[in-house]
Image (spheres, rainbow, N blue to C red):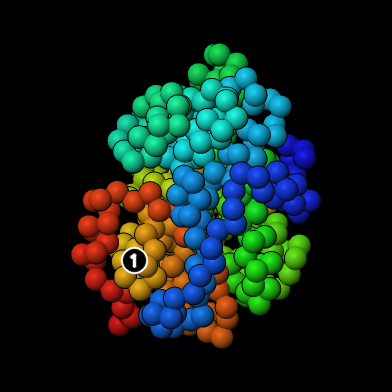
Amino acid sequence: MTAHRVTFDDVLAARTFLASHLRPTPLIRREALCEALGIEALLKCESALPTAAFKVRGGLNLLGRDPTAKAGVIAASTGNHGQSLSYAGKTFGIPVTIVAPVGANPLKLVAMRGYGATIIEHGVDYDEAREECERRAAATGVRYVHSGNEPYLIAGVGTAALEVLEERPDVDVLIVPIGGGSGAAGACIVAKHLRPSVRVIGVQSSGAPAAYLSWRDRRPQVGGPIRTFAEGLATRTSFELPQRILMDLLDDFVLVDDEDIYRAMRLLLVAGHQLAEGAGAAATAAAWKLRDQLQQKTVALWISGANATAESITKALASGELVTAD
């Protein structure tokens, strides 16, 4: 594996390594959810992983296989990347330090500390935490693990798409949430190798559209202040390696607003019997938005994480149902 390219063979190698650490996650169908969305929808429940989020696939693959990580790592995270590395650090006995923005999801901070990570809270959002993390890494020489520009991470999270397409070769569309883009990049690599006709659609919050704007304009874009509760989608900058893959392979990219994400959380809970955090519900929100073009298609929707706070669940339950706009 090189620093500039991630291949399908890298995903296969990741699956082989991860087989002794993780079980494949469920791919489930709920009739009530399909009826509500008006499409044939399958839920890829990455929320069933040990950290209740997809990124643990990448964290285990990197810390378990990258020799440069063995002495310890530092990373910036709003939560799920940090949980991933913290869990992997505990698994392999590797020291982990996470720089998180002040006010980050408390459930994720508690989990990271529980896995033994050192937590430093700094800045108002992910990007300020990332800048502090990079400063500390440069000053100390500790291995910095970027949340997107890491081939081992992308190969690891790509194993989810491999599970989907091997279990259900009839799937026509994959919808994957995007913050930095590692999950969608991994899905693209797998889908375009196994079945080039499979469409991969990314989804990001309209309140944090940096990755979307960069993909659309084919050049790096910086977003404004974060205006979404979905911390897994909340970045102000695009990530170079995932963007390169997405520009080459991603079929479409849509934005959803917070109200639709809350409603999708409610739908997943009530009709799908699945808890999703904001980012984890984004694919379902996108499926609703794109439902007319998804008719007669079998669509896999990523529930990328389930680390929802009580406050967000309360707002989701109060949000009402997804309804057709006039």
Q: Position of residue 67 (x, y in %)?
A: 71, 27
Please tell me which residue is depicted at 73% across the width and 48% down the height of the picture.
Answer: 16
Rate crowding at label 1 as few (under 14), some (14 to 19) or many (20 or more) other CA atoms within 10 Å. Answer: some
What amino acid is found at the position of numbered circle 1 in the picture? Leu
Above or below, 266 relative to 122: below
Q: Position of residue 292 (x, y in %)?
A: 48, 82
| Residue drawn at (55%, 13%) of the image | 140
Residue 253 shows in the view: no
Residue wearing tag 1: 269
Residue drawn at 38 percent across, 39 percent down: 108
Q: Furthest residue to the front? A: 20
Q: Tell me the quadrant of the picture where the C terminus can be found.
A: bottom left
Q: Residue at x 39, y 58 (%)?
A: 276
Horizontal arrangement in the rendering, residue 199 relative to residue 113 (left or right): right
Q: Is residue 313 left or right of residue 50?
A: left
In this view of the protein, which residue sits in the foreground, 298 or 18?
18
Front residue of 77/89: it is: 89
Coordinates of residue 188 in the picture (x, y in percent): 66, 59
Residue 212 against residue 142 in the figure, above or below: below
